Amino acid sequence: MSDNPNAHELDAHGAETYPETLRITVGSAGDVFNRARDQLTTDGVADAAVRSFESIADVRQLLTDRRVEVMRAIMTDTPESISSLADRLDRNYADVHGDVQVLAEHHIVYFETEGRSKRPVIPYGRVHLDIEVAGDTEPDHALA
């Protein structure tokens, strides 16, 4: 996590500077780089933001049912604050705050700050989970 307390705040242009889609993938750093390079449009802007994880277990640990519920609630009707989000979800503030912070650490949730209030925002129109499952095609790994 960044030492900058504003590291997860939207930039001056707000959500309109973010791609429409956030893709959450599983793969090596090289795979992620290649996919990101391949998806650049001709003007050098990515069609989607990409967050990649090394294993499916890492994605499962991040995207719990409760965190997906938080994401849906934020994307459906952006709350005025984490407190109002907790009220809407009928959950304890501390638990919702913790879930929002974890999502912010992974650059899924960002914040718009107004005074002392931090408004959680997901600047993407949709989040796409991209996990490929394939058989092992390496000859060295063939079953005997």
Image (tube, rainbow, N blue to C red):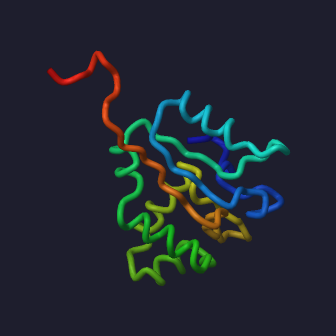
At x 68%, y 43%, the residue is 39
Observer-nearest of 100 and 122: 122
Q: Position of residue 138 (x, y in %)?
A: 34, 22
Q: How many marks?
A: 0
Tell which of 100 and 131 is nearer to you.
131
Quadrant (top left/top right/bottom left/bottom right) for the C terminus: top left
32 vs 8: above or below: above
Farthest residue, direction left: 144
Q: Residue at x 68, y 36 (%)?
A: 37
In-image side of 39 versus 55 (left or right): right
Quadrant of the rendered image containing residue 15: bottom right
Q: Position of residue 13 (x, y in %)?
A: 83, 60
Residue in the foreground of this view, choosing between 108 and 89 = 108
At a point 46% along the width and 77% down the height, the residue shown is 86
Where the N terminus falls, by quadrant?
A: top right
Q: Position of residue 108 (x, y in %)?
A: 57, 56
Name, please, the residue furthest toward the top: 140
Decide if residue 16 is on the left or right side of residue 5: right
Q: Is residue 143 above or below residue 112?
A: above
**Residue shown at 31% from the left, 18% from the top:** 139
Give the left or right position of residue 69, taking residue 119 as reference: left
**Residue in the foreground of this view, choosing between 95 and 37:** 37
Which image quadrant is residue 120 in?
A: bottom right
